Image (spheres, helix red, strand yellow):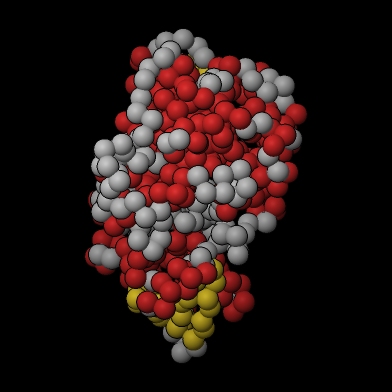
Amino acid sequence: MYYAERLAKWVVDLKYQDIPVDVVEKAKLCIYDWVCITLYGAESPWSKALLEIVREAGGREESTILAHKDLVPCSNAAMVNAVMALSYDLSDTYPRVELHPSCSVIASALAVAERENTAGKDLITSVVAGYEVITRVASAMNRRPQSFTAARGFEANSIFPPFGAVVASGKLFNLNQEEMTNAIGLAGGSMGAATIDYLVDGNWTYRWNSARASHNGILNALMAKKGFVAPHAIFEGQWDSKGRFGVINALAGDMTFQDDLVDGLGETWNIKEMAFKYYGCCHYNQGYTDGILKLIKEHGFEAEDVYEITAYVPHFALFLGVPREVKIKPKNLTISQWSLPFILATVIADGHLLNPKEQLSEKRLTDTRMLDLADKVKIERDRELDKIFMEDGIFKSPLKVRLKNGKEYEVASTCKGFSHNPLTGEEMDNKFDVLTSGVFDKGKRERIKKELKTIEGIKSVSEWVRSW
């Protein structure tokens, strides 16, 4: 059997009762987190631009655009919700490959679950299936230390999300094994090989990638259900043993990790490794952010007391501070979220970063006080940190603070939200409350939180979502 066929069989056969309890609970957390970050991103400029296009197009009233409450065609609702979810970089992360599955997988799953009026257990099952497939495809092509696709400049969130979205959608459309195989094959044709140049100029393609994947995932699933035929050898190709004409070789250029697609399928659950963000920026900034806040809490210094900060980063994360002229004076929100100097300046000044739309606004990015503070942050490469990450999977984030009074403090936190430094239940709830405070009153917010935590008991996803 081809890889796509093996994945399709597993997805089609998967039942809610087959999923371990801890996996179900993690999937519920992913949905819980996705809801709050999506609602928070409802008014972002990229979301509103896409929303206007969808409104102008009109169409059947199938699924809800959250916060705005528009009822639009299913794929369009998923598309806008996905952009909203990735609006301010608060989404979950699969640490092995710098991937944000929820934005596309859950956007597609919720939109289809609403259209098909399925139950909460079906939604959970589809999300688990989508996460397992998207992370396995990503691992086969972008696994460290080689990171084949990233090394070529491809953006992970443009390449892999179509596979998770199509599987989650197809599961809810009740595709059979042949149809699911074709759906996965079609997803290979929906991959967009976008590049990571947004790190330098802050263009909006990063926000769009998951939206396109969500839209196409639903469309591809429907195409497969209508009998659309796709390549079954989409991953490995069928020309020769080198994988020519398969997507792994085409984009990664190496077939070393192709078996990651199916190894341990149904036994090893990748969704359990998902990390959640507590700060609205690149996940690789999270450990340094966590560390500086710990030092401030312990020693009581303020922004005005800081003389210099030195952050030590692994070689592969030098982009957090390079090019320096771009990172210490970011021109827009997107660049600032990948700027360790500006992120550290922000949390030193504010004590948190759970409102990036305001904290990283244009006004803030031109504030001389913030720019002066960012300029005090120096980035130094430490290759030993690469070794620690490759061997132990830990993104150690050491930094040293020197105050104007001559005192020096050091801290070596680990990446906040990862399994070795996870968010607490209280932090998850606080994140939800902060991000949805402008959308729900306290009563509705508490009701929705309770329902999300017991989502397996929901009988009608359609009625539930439309009651928000």
Residue sitting at x 38%, y 78%: 382
Residue sitting at x 50%, y 88%: 407
- How many circles with numbers are drawn on the protein? 0
Query: In the rendered image, which quarter is residue 452 located in?
Result: top right
Where residue 249 appears, as percent x and y from the top left, is: 29, 46
Towards the viewer: 133 or 273: 133
346 above or below 87?
A: below
Towards the viewer: 347 or 258: 258
Q: Quadrant of the N terminus?
A: top left
Left or right relative to 167: residue 24:
right
Towards the viewer: 405 or 235: 235
Residue sitting at x 52%, y 49%: 263
Query: In the rendered image, which quarter is residue 34 located in?
Result: top right
Query: In the rendered image, which quarter is residue 234 located in?
Result: top left
**Residue closest to the far top:** 60
444 above or below 330?
A: above
Q: Quadrant of the C terminus?
A: top right
Residue sitting at x 59%, y 79%: 299
Where residue 453 appears, as percent x and y from the top left, is: 71, 38
39 above or below 60?
A: below
- The answer to whether residue 52 of the structure is visible from this angle is no
Where residue 18 appears, as percent x and y from the top left, is: 69, 37
- The answer to whether residue 264 of the structure is visible from this angle is yes
